[in-house]
Image (spheres, grey):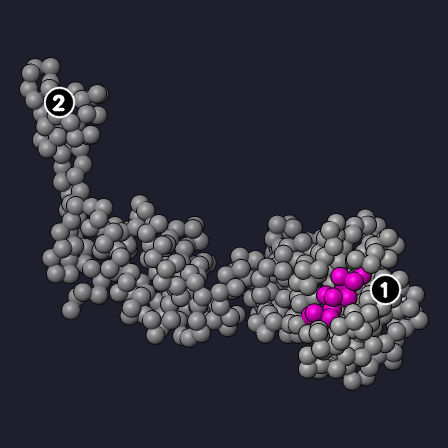
């Protein structure tokens, strides 16, 4: 891969970052930095503002362009940022109107995570939403910036940190390219996703543009973000009409929405595996939520469905033993419905279906026999439940009140007429027979 690093001589932050890169290479050698691992790195400097720079100043053979520059803001904060080039509207700061530049989500993510490692005290780390040109550079491009005033642009700790973020960048093979919608200029939720999950943001759109965005622009976001596979929608930053608009566009384009919670779950598996298991869950029901336990291996998913009455008898009042078992076993999903209710459905690798199914059944039986009065006969488990019968107590002439309470607690009572009544005399016994799955043969 050929990587071209571009800065402007009239941009103090870009000039300083470039000098810091040169200094670090002189002191430690190229071999000390992942950027040079298998890559050819070239450098170019322009005398113009970057946003108006012509592509002729670039290495024509570049596969990736990293622009080091300053970040400025009307509300200045000390910050290290990374963002893609492009315009969702008029190109007031370079580039063509309504055009996005090509970018590389995986490389931006790598730099963002390095920002978090090297950031000086007092600075924040952030993605920025897509907001300026140029838009016609021939290779995927992104900006690495120090902000937001002359003080920060000339802060050696800050621009050296930015230089290290570039030199130590090494994209992860399992980064998941996605696009983002909603939030402010500093893309708060997207920045968390980029640092803490496999999610790698490409183009990101400010809340103000989401309500009116059309499918053509969203398609550009996807295609120029390395073929993003999904979209994150910051629903808390959007109104209902804005959410309705963007979800409609995503559905029209066939771009799946992925939540921050789902991306956290993906830390345990590949995106391809997640999609397989999601598809399997959709066969069972809509709006189900999957929760992985441990690392989920590559493979073909298989469902384990326990009878509702059997599952409820085992874990209806206490599911902690079940969750402990799933955590210890790993490689399993438990599932909840739209209301959050735990369902008697589990997903696991087809190769492990038999052992996991057997383990769940054994645990369920153990939980029932441990907590309830029951008898097992072959593949039938009969549960007996004893309950104080107020109607029967009244037929025996027992007045409601404190005596009812004592009898329901298992205490023998003496009535005003001198009769003694034991709990057994006012207790009804109900029996429920449940077939134990897997033992029919």
Q: Please tell me the numbered disc located at residue 16.
A: 1
> What span is in magenta?
159-169
Q: Main secondary structure of the magenta part?
A: helix
**Image position of 376 (left or right of 292):** left
Vertical placement of residue 402 versus 342, above or below: above
1 or 2: mark nearer the eye? 1
Q: Residue furthest bottom?
A: 61
Does 200 appear in magenta? no
Vertical placement of residue 50 versus 74, above or below: below
Which image quarter holds the C terminus? bottom left
**Image position of 412 (left or right of 123):** left
Q: CA distance from mark 1 to mark 2?
A: 89 Å
Identified at 79% across, 62% down, the residue is: 160
Q: Which residue corresponds to mark 2? A: 413
Question: Which of the pair 366/274 is nearer the observer?
Answer: 366
Q: Position of residue 187 (x, y in %)?
A: 69, 56
Q: Position of residue 343 (x, y in %)?
A: 36, 55
Q: Residue furthest front?
A: 27
Question: Which of the pair 416/20 is nearer the observer?
Answer: 20
**Image position of 375 (left or right of 95):** left
**Image position of 225 (left or right of 91):** left
Kindly indicate the quadrant of the structure image that contains residue 96.
bottom right
Q: Position of residue 120 (x, y in %)?
A: 74, 54
């Amino acid at each position: 891969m050929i990587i071209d690093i571009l800065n402007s001589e009239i941009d103090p932050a870009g000039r300083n970052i470039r000098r810091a890169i040169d200094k670090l290479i002189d002191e430690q050698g190229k071999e000390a930095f992942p950027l040079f691992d298998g890559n050819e790195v070239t450098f170019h400097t322009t005398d113009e503002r970057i946003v108006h720079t012509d592509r002729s100043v670039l290495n024509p053979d570049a596969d990736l362009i990293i622009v080091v520059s300053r970040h400025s803001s009307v509300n200045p904060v000390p910050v290290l940022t990374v963002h893609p080039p492009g315009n969702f509207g008029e190109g007031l700061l370079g580039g063509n109107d309504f055009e996005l530049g090509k970018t590389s989500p995986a490389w931006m993510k790598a730099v963002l995570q390095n920002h978090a490692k090297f950031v000086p005290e007092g600075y924040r780390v952030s993605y920025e939403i897509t907001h300026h040109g140029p838009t016609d550079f021939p290779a995927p491009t992104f900006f690495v910036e120090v902000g937001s005033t002359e003080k920060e642009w000339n802060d050696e700790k800050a621009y050296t940190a930015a230089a290290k973020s570039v030199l130590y960048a090494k994209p992860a093979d399992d980064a998941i390219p996605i696009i983002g919608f909603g939030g402010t200029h500093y893309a708060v939720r997207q920045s968390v996703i980029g640092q803490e999950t496999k999610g790698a943001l490409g183009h990101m759109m400010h809340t103000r543009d989401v309500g009116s965005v059309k499918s053509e622009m969203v398609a550009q976001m996807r295609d120029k973000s390395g073929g993003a596979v999904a979209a994150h929608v910051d629903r808390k930053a959007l109104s209902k009409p804005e959410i309705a608009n963007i979800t409609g566009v995503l559905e029209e384009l066939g771009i799946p929405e992925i939540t921050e919670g789902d991306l956290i779950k993906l830390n345990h598996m590949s995106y391809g595996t997640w999609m397989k298991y999601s598809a399997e869950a959709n066969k069972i029901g809509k709006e189900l939520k999957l929760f992985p336990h441990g690392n989920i291996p590559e493979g073909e998913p298989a469902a384990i469905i326990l009878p509702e009455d059997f599952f409820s008898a085992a874990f209806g009042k206490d599911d902690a033993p079940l969750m402990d078992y799933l955590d210890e076993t790993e490689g399993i999903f438990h599932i909840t419905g739209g209301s959050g209710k735990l369902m008697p459905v589990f997903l696991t690798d087809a190769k492990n279906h038999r052992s996991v199914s057997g383990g769940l059944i054994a645990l369920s039986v153990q939980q029932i026999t441990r907590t309830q009065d029951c008898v097992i006969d072959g593949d039938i488990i009969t549960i007996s439940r004893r309950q104080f019968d107020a109607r029967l107590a009244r037929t025996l002439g027992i007045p409601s009140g404190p005596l009812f309470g004592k009898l329901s607690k298992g205490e023998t009572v003496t009535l005003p007429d001198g009769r003694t009544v034991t709990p057994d005399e006012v207790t009804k016994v109900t029996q429920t027979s449940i077939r134990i799955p897997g033992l029919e043969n």
